């Protein structure tokens, strides 16, 4: 590991497959690292972002049994971008189905951005299956956070937000979420694909404190943008399928478990106020505000904190 790229070396899965969870959805899953090691579940962002080989590199492969999967409609799961039969309760059921299939009793849960949302929701539904939590870029899926994503980011990235809005006719720009809904969920790929690319590019251009051109390119591929564009809009329209402030109100179910919150100070995708709210509700969790970072888990300061957390849990089963 180095200061600029504090990751473990690339590894390949020792097994992988597709898990059919209903008549429509099949989920890609994989295991890497040590088959006899401490199980850790990686939950990707988005919704719809999917996993990448680089996600394996947050974990010591000699110690961890690393489980990655693509959530419904994301990554290598099929059908890509499918929003029907796609809700947070169903994702939680999918995680449990995967855990049982793999014969895992308990696991450490690691999630960033929407992955932190799903980690909290899963943990509160099944606290007895969790060893602890490593959470990054907190998103509680409240109406205020959704409005910030759709509109507030323009205060920091005005030209990026203007380009995002320019995909929509001027008379519809008063409600960008509903305007994108009409385009993203139609049946014509000539309409929904450009809308998905526009949505995904908007997010990709705001991820880093210092722009990362490769990330922007990655976010505008059809494989990534269709999942992110459609599924983020779908979950935003349904406020994550949560009741009001559900994730804060449910903290009592998991507050006895070790947890660390890693947050970029200049994260405009998931502003620090949400991480602060979570820590106020869960003071037992360790909070780390990274002063020179935005949203991405690959930024050096955030990556170092996440790697340190996986190593500390490996050695001590806690976060000091």
Image (cartoon, rainbow, N blue to C red):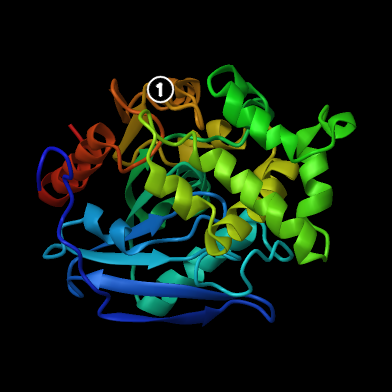
Name above or below for residue 101 compared with residue 160.
below
Q: Residue 256 placed where, x, y %? A: 35, 38
Q: Residue 263 placed where, x, y %? A: 36, 29
**Which one is in front, 106 or 133?**
133
Residue located beneath label 1 in the image? 266
Residue drawn at the location 70% of the way across and 61% of the way down = 83
Q: Residue 20 placed where, x, y %? A: 57, 81
**Which one is in front, 279 or 55?**
55
Number of numbered discs overlaid on the protein picture? 1
Q: In the drawing, does residue 70 fall left or right of residue 73? A: left
- Report the quarter where the C terminus lies: top left
Callout 1 crowding tier (Cα within 10 Å): few <14, some 14–19, many ≥20: some
**Which one is in front, 99 or 229?**
229
The outermost residue toward the right is 171
Q: Residue 57 placed where, x, y %? A: 23, 57
Residue drawn at the location 63% of the way across and 75% of the way down = 25
Q: In the drawing, does residue 190 fall left or right of residue 276? A: right
Residue drawn at the location 59% of the way across and 25% of the way down = 159
Residue drawn at the location 64% of the way across and 46% of the way down = 198
């Amino acid at each position: 590991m180095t200061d600029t790229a504090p990751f473990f070396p690339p590894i390949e899965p020792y097994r992988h497959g597709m898990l059919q969870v209903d008549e429509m959805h099949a989920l890609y899953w994989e295991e890497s690292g040590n088959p006899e090691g401490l199980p850790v579940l990686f939950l990707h962002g988005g919704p719809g972002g999917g996993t990448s080989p680089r996600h394996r590199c947050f974990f010591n492969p000699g110690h961890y049994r690393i489980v990655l999967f693509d959530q419904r409609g994301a990554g290598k799961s099929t059908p890509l971008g499918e929003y029907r039969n796609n809700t947070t309760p169903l994702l939680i059921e999918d995680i449990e189905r995967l855990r049982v299939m793999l014969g895992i009793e308990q696991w450490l849960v690691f999630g960033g951005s929407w992955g932190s949302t799903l980690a909290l929701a899963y943990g509160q539904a099944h606290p007895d299956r969790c060893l602890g939590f490593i959470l990054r870029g907190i998103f509680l899926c409240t109406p205020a956070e959704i409005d910030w994503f759709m509109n507030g980011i323009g205060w920091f990235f005005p030209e990026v937000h203007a380009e995002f809005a320019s995909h929509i006719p001027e008379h519809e720009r008063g409600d960008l979420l509903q305007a994108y809904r009409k385009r993203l969920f139609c049946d014509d790929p000539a309409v929904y694909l450009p809308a998905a690319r526009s949505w995904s590019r908007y997010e990709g251009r705001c991820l880093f404190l210092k722009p990362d051109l490769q990330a922007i390119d990655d976010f505008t591929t059809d494989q990534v943008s269709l999942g992110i564009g459609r599924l983020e809009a779908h979950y935003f329209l349904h406020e994550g399928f949560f009741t009001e402030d559900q994730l804060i109100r449910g903290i009592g179910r998991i507050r006895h478990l070790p947890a660390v919150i890693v947050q970029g100070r200049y994260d405009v995708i998931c502003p620090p106020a949400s991480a602060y709210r979570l820590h106020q509700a869960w003071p037992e969790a360790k909070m780390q505000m990274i002063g020179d970072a935005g949203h991405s888990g690959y930024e050096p300061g955030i990556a170092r904190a996440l790697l340190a957390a996986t190593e500390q849990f490996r050695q001590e089963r806690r976060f000091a």
